[in-house]
Image (cartoon, rainbow, N blue to C red):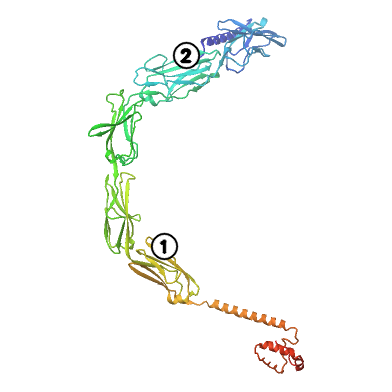
Amino acid sequence: MEPPDARAGARRASQLLVLTLLLGAQPGAKAEVRLSVPPLVEVMRGDPVTLDCTPSGTHDYFMLEWFLADRSGIRHRLASAELQGSKLQDKVHDSRGRSPPYQLDSRGRLVLAEAQVGDERDYVCVVRAGAAGTAEATARLIVFAKPEDTEVTPNKGILSVMEDTAQEIATCNSRNGNPAPQIMWYRNGQRLEVPMEMNSEGYMTSRTVREASGLQSLTSTLYLRLRKADRDASFHCSAHYRLPTGQHGRLDSPAFHLTLHYPTEHVQFWVGSPSTTAGWVREGDSVQLFCQGDGSPSPEYTFFHLQDKQEVVLKTNLEGNLTLEGVQRSQSGTYGCRVEDYDAAEDAELSKTRELHVAYLDPLELSIGEELSLPLGNSTAVNCSVQGLPTPTLRWTKDSAPLGNDPTLSLRSITFDSAGTYVCEAFMSTVPLLSRTRSFKLLVQGPPELRAEETKPKAEGSWTEGDEVRLTCYARGYPEPKLSWSQLGGSPAEPAPGEQGWVSSSLTLKVTSALSRDGVSCAASNPHGHDQHVFHFGTVAPQTSQAGVAVMAVAVSVGLLLIVVAAFYCMRRKGHPGCCRRREKGSPPPREPELSHSGSERPEQTGLLMGGASGGARHGSGGFGDEC
């Protein structure tokens, strides 16, 4: 909002300008000087500003002066400029302590560097043009300054909704702005329409302070009569400030909440630990009971247990919680919580109760021990009993397969397939995770049952000597049977993978004609009996192709050996003529050598000696030389 003196000054300047124009327009008027001066100049603090005062028309001479009008109306000459010929001679007479000082530009305009709040004045321009007359105009300068961030200081105390008058809520400050900003209050984002006059429902007060810098600060305090609904309300204030050319700005403060005191009207009481909707908790668990009233500040809570219609106090605190460690079945009953709030209305319900049921499940009992041994083909019945609350459900299973829900399990004409582990499970559908199990192992006594796993049979007569085959036998029974083979090399009996109660043994061997005739037997035995299986192979063909190859290899080896011996012998005889030559046709055979009396010389040696002693006869015969 503009100050009254600013509006009055603007009106005077406008009237003076209109009067000047009218006088210049009248025929014969002496004042013909017209001035172009803006009546209102708006600028932000710190920005430069230039005030224009330009006489219209052509003048050979005029004197221009700038005056500063104070609040009392007295004028102080700041600067002047005189037109002589084509040059304008200017001079600053008095800057009134302003820093930096006033200046005139080449056109006689008044220049203010870095506009300050103290520059908000009326500036009068007077032009004397001799015979053309005198004219003056006033420019009003307004300097705007954006305030600092808005600060709010809420009431830190406890405010009671039981008060029937307005209480102080908070104080809001907007500092160092120009002109002074306007402060508004908001609750949950909605503007509060509160008057400036004091009343019991709500009002606000404001105080404006002009700082030493000339800037203005505004403080506003809000008073309201509070209700219980204000316990969750969000409050804040905002400063609205003006800017040049009719613009506006807004700075919001941080939001805040109040701490209220209001009496309890309702109480909630519940079980915090895992429980069912019917109030069942498991025996042995820690049970938490929670109590909460809607009063503020937090009232005092008293927990109690009703026994024979009498309240047995368990705990009193301000937190509103009670923990029952390792709750037992004897602790079932009615529990209650009471809020101690003396400001509450007489008809307010400050106490709540609820039933707490402790569910329990005792260990299961079987009519037999952990292991039951029966002969093959017998029948029996096993009973499973349990005690619990609420009533548990029983279920029999074997290898996770359901067998029935009766307490008694009937086993008729048992077989080896009946052997295994039987489980009796007790559970409660209304109490999650509360269950127990008990099991027994059934052993079925009887002679071994044997099962053989043969390799894929070949066509009759397609087995060949040396083929490798793997044979496997499976057996079951109780006591566990022993497995044996008619051939060496069988593996020890081990439990068969994925087949409960079965053991297995394997034998790897090569097929022969003897096995084709006699077969390979696998036997299983225990104290109750014996069982056997014979593996047959049919006709086994000999390895003919391999035998022919072997004979041919032997023949080739012997031939090569004979060739090597003959070559060696010829090399030994190469020094004697005619060695290894064919005898001439028709020559008589050589004479048989005579044996020595000792008979120790070999024929080859004797012949050689004889040939060496009768060399003349050898040459004289004309038939053969040394024999090969």
Camera-nearest residue between 189 and 320: 320
Q: Quadrant of residue 622?
A: bottom right
Task: Assess disc 2: are there few (<14), some (14-19) or many (≥20) residues with their C-alpha within 10 Å of its C-alpha.
Answer: few
Residue occupying the far left of the picture:
308
Q: Which residue is mark 2?
A: 207
Q: Residue at x 52, y 76 (%)?
A: 543
Q: Nearer the viewer, mark 1 or mark 2?
A: 1
User: Where is residue 440 drawn, in percent x and y?
Assistant: 32, 55
Query: Vertical placement of 221 versus 531: above or below?
Result: above
Camera-nearest residue between 364 and 104: 364
Query: Vertical placement of 395 versus 555: above or below?
Result: above
Q: Which mark is residue 278?
A: none
Query: Would residue 315 appear left or right of 249 to someone viewing this image?
Result: left
User: Where is residue 524 drawn, in percent x and y?
Assistant: 38, 68
Q: Residue at x 35, y 56 (%)?
A: 399
User: Where is residue 252 drawn, in percent x and y?
Assistant: 48, 23
Q: Which residue is mark 1?
A: 494
Quadrant placement of the C terminus: bottom right
Task: Assess disc 1: are there few (<14), some (14-19) or many (≥20) residues with their C-alpha within 10 Å of its C-alpha.
Answer: few
Query: Vertical placement of 192 versus 572: above or below?
Result: above
Residue occupying the far front of the picture:
598
Camera-nearest residue between 461 and 619: 619
Query: Vertical placement of 529 versus 335: above or below?
Result: below
Mark 2 lies on a secondary structure that is strand
Query: Would residue 351 appear left or right of 463 to someone viewing this image?
Result: left
How many angstroms separate mark 1 from mark 2 (CA)?
A: 100 Å
Residue type at mark 2 is Arg
Residue type at mark 1 is Glu
Q: Is residue 138 visible?
A: yes
User: Where is residue 323 drawn, in percent x and y?
Assistant: 34, 35
Q: Quadrant of residue 287?
A: top left
